[in-house]
């Protein structure tokens, strides 16, 4: 096989996302530990059970990135391998994949892309890589274009609760303080791999409306972009947001998807993540 795309499970993608005999695809799962139980973030993860454990546990749940050997196994079977990981400032996946690259003895070319984001932003990079491969671009061309795409991809999010992000140290103390204020629904964004607050708003609906406004402030032209709305058990607000975005902008597509294991764990029920 000439090419293979590897991604970690914070992308929300399932193992059958790309079905192509010429291009391999593999999702390397993270692991979530809650209330004494371990949940592997693969196609079969039981989110209902995970949330029941979260609700009943007095201790914070923990997440762990795949071991280098997990990535090393995923690298097998191709001459050129493109890896997309969650932001290296939020997880150790990038470092683990880099260790695996250094361990690899097959002679394959391995590009590891720190997405600097998560969820739909990673899906956008995977889609871009796949399109470039099918267009017959060289490995060097794919590398250049994919890194440029990474640097021009954005993410905004609104959460109902920030408990797991705060407890696991995924936010700065200042951002964590703002996020836990009962009367504030902060509109947050990804900035060079870190979580920051864009605006402080009083209601969830207000935050969603401001999210739509801020898309236009962050990108001047949406015609050649797709928008991915990832939600955790909140299809109602996700579809409402999809309608607002379609009315305001000319994205090629506005996709609504469910958050899976890791993204659901951190965004919790009600969470909305928008990548574009």
Image (spheres, grey):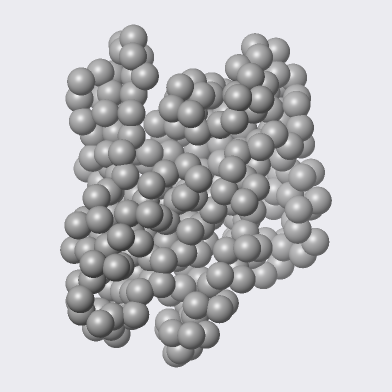
Would you identify the image quadrant in which residue 107 lies?
bottom left
Q: Nearer the viewer, residue 92 or 208?
A: 92
Q: Position of residue 178 (x, y in %)?
A: 67, 21
Q: Residue at x 57, y 77 (%)?
A: 145
In percent of width and height, residue 242 lies at 63, 45
Q: Nearer the viewer, residue 226 or 239?
A: 226
Task: Mark yes or no: residue 235 visible.
Answer: no
197 to 128, vertically: above or below:
above
Give the number of callouts. 0
Q: Quadrant of the N terminus?
A: bottom left
Residue positioned 48% across, 85% down in the render: 140
Q: Is residue 150 left or right of residue 91?
A: right
Q: Residue 81: where, in percent of width, then height?
A: 33, 74
> Left of 251 or right of it: where is 107?
left
Residue 102, image x, y percentages: 29, 68
Is 4 above or below relative to 53? Answer: below
Look at the image and tell me in which quarter the C terminus lies: bottom right
Q: Residue at x 73, y 37 (%)?
A: 198
At a point 65% along the width and 42% down the height, the residue shown is 189
Instruction: Note whether residue 262 is visible.
Output: yes
């Amino acid at each position: 096989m000439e090419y293979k795309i590897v991604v970690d499970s914070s992308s929300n993608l399932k193992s059958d996302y790309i079905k192509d005999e010429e291009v391999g695809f593999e999702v390397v799962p993270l692991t979530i530990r809650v209330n004494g139980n371990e949940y592997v973030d693969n196609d079969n993860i039981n989110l209902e059970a995970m949330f029941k454990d979260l609700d009943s546990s007095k201790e914070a749940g923990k997440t762990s990135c795949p071991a280098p050997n997990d990535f090393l196994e995923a690298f097998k079977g191709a001459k050129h391998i493109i890896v997309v990981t969650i932001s290296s400032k939020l997880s150790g996946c990038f470092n683990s994949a880099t260790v695996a690259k250094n361990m690899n003895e097959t002679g394959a070319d391995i590009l590891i892309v720190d997405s600097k984001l998560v969820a739909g932003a990673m899906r956008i990079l995977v889609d871009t890589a796949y399109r470039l491969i099918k267009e017959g671009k060289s490995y060097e061309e794919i590398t250049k274009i994919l890194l440029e795409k990474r640097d021009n991809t954005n993410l905004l999010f609104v959460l109902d609760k920030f408990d797991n992000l705060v407890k696991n140290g995924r936010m700065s103390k200042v951002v964590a303080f703002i996020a836990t204020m009962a009367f504030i629904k902060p509109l947050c964004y990804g900035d060079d791999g870190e979580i920051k607050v864009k605006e402080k708003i009083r209601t969830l609906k207000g935050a969603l409306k401001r999210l739509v406004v801020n898309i236009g402030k962050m990108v001047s032209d949406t015609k050649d972009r797709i928008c991915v709305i990832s939600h955790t058990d909140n299809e109602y607000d996700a579809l409402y947001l999809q309608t607002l975005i379609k009315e305001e902008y000319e994205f090629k597509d506005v996709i609504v998807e469910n958050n899976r294991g890791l993204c659901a764990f951190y965004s919790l029920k009600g969470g909305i993540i928008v990548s574009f």
